Amino acid sequence: KLTQYTVQQPLPNSCTVGYFIDEVTHFKIKACIGEPTFQGMSFLDKVKKAGKAVVDSGAKTMLRTDVAFLERQINQRKQKFGVEVYELMEQLELDTGMPTEEKETKIRLAFDKARKDIAVTQAKIEVKQEEMLAMENESISTAPVIPPSSGVVLTNGQPAQSQTDS
């Protein structure tokens, strides 16, 4: 079985890229005329470049997931702080023998502990965001210049569904 995919541009420098797959899975690629980004690249280099793009995309998705998880941790910590302060204030309201300064100190300690926990998590978020930014900058600097897709027709050598219906 042979499957051929052809890309044609209605420009003077037509472009044909063929992928031929048989029982032993052989690939043959014909480079496009006027495609400077892939000129001189071997098939292995093209596969490596595509693989790196997939890995980078997965890493970015993982970092976004990590950031969302850390933001949820911050919200949970703030909610826990609210419960702690409420219970503390409720307890301090019943204990009328304790001086006001001591009550304020207990509340302040709860706040300081929560603020420290949130700051640590926020620092982790900033590190993840810096990693994402570094990955984006790296992919922009190594990204090939892709020609505009206007006028490109994709066919796979088989009649279109609408042609077989009529």
Image (cartoon, rainbow, N blue to C red):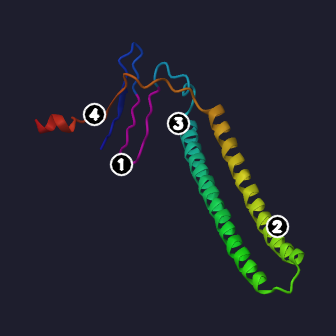
Q: Nearer the viewer, residue 98 or 87?
A: 98
Q: Say few, some or many: other residues with alpha carbon within 10 Å of mark 4 (under 14 / 14 to 19 / 20 or more).
A: few
Q: Residue at x 66, y 65 (%)?
A: 73
Q: Earlier in the sequence, mark 4 or mark 1?
A: 1
Q: Check disc 2 and report the residue beneath it.
A: 112
Badge 2 amino acid: Asp
Q: Spatial distance from mark 2 to mark 3, Cα to Cα?
A: 58 Å
SS type, badge 3: helix
Q: In the rendered image, which quarter is residue 87 located in?
A: bottom right
Residue 25 position within the rendered picture, expressed as x and y whole percent measured from the top left: 41, 46
The amino acid type found where label 3 is placed reads Phe
| Numbered badge on residue 157 | 4
Q: Nearer the viewer, mark 4 or mark 3?
A: 4
- Vertically, is 132 above or below 79? above
Under tag 4, what secondary structure?
loop
Span shown in magenta: 17-31
Q: Earlier in the sequence, mark 2 or mark 3?
A: 3
Residue 65 x, y percent position in the rendering: 59, 57
Q: Residue at x 55, y 25 (%)?
A: 39
User: Which amino acid does the dot numbered 4 rest on?
Assistant: Gly
Q: Which residue is mark 1?
A: 23
131 or 161: nearer the eye?
131
Label 3 crowd bin: few (<14), some (14–19), many (20+), radius 10 Å = few
To which quarter of the image does residue 37 belong? top right
**Residue under circle 3?**
43
For the residues labelled 4 and 3, the Cα–Cα distance comes to: 23 Å
